[in-house]
Amino acid sequence: MAEFGDKTQLVSLTLASRYPPLQVLGGAMTGLALVMGLAVGAGGLVAAYIPAAVISAASGILFVIMGLLTLLQRERETDPRSGKGGFYQTAALVFFAELGDKTQMAALLLCAHSARPVAVFIGAMAGMFLNHSLAVFLGGRFISRLPPLTLKRATAVLFIGMGLIMLLLLALGRV
């Protein structure tokens, strides 16, 4: 439930409108598996050695950069739905967006409390799969019907907005 409406779900929703839904779902699940693996495998170490401010700043900057690249990217002759671009872009964005996020922290704390890392990992990934499957379905089925230029601009604005909000919260000391 902590992931519902979260920025990583929005990433899956918007990218599924540009790329094949299974690529986006695979990329999202790969990024999430890496982040959840960090949470349950090295949770305390990650939190101890990488300050939350650094993670938030890197995530915010990455979102702004991806938004600007989306906005400035020229339309190619080839179909953006071919190749593996959707997988890699989704995996990277989801990984960085989820680092230090509430769901990663929830998994970390649940693992520390229960001392059952495999069960926590499986449970977290099952919840993430359901959440992101819904986002990918909606993005691929409905949002993909928008005109390409409108979709491109909306995606860019969404990414830049998320990045700026993350950086603003960091500047205000809310991270």
Image: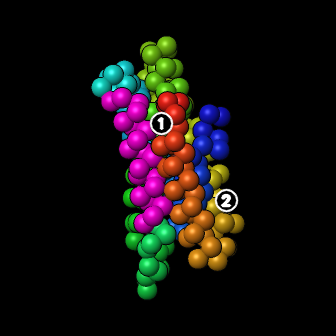
Task: Give me the C-alpha separation between circle 2 and circle 1.
Answer: 31 Å
Residue lying farthest bottom? 77
Up the image or down, 86 lies above or below 96; here it is below
Q: What residue would you read off at disc 2?
A: 138
Q: Quadrant of residue 102?
A: top right
Q: Position of residue 4 (x, y in %)?
A: 65, 41
Give the residue at mark 1: 170
The three-letter amino acid code for the residue at tag 2 is Leu
- Badge 2 or badge 1: first in the primary sequence: 2
Magenta segment:
50-69
Looking at the magenta stretch, what is its main secondary structure? helix
Q: Identify the image quadrant of the N terminus.
A: top right
Q: Is residue 53 magenta?
A: yes
Dot 2 surroundings within 10 Å: few (below 14), some, or many (20 or more)? Answer: some
Q: Are marks 2 and 1 in contact (CB under 8 Å)?
A: no
Q: Would you call the spot at circle 1 few (<14 residues within 10 Å), some (14-19), or many (20 or more)?
A: some
Q: Secondary structure at mark 2?
A: helix
Q: What x and y, as percent, mark residue 65?
A: 41, 58
Q: In the image, what residue occupies the spot 33% across and 30% down?
A: 50
| Image coordinates for residue 127, horizontal then vertical, percent | 59, 37
| Left or right relative to 106: residue 77 | left
Foreground: 111 or 47?
47
Relative to 162, does residue 155 appear above or below in the rendering? below
Asked which secondary structure carries label 1, the reply is helix
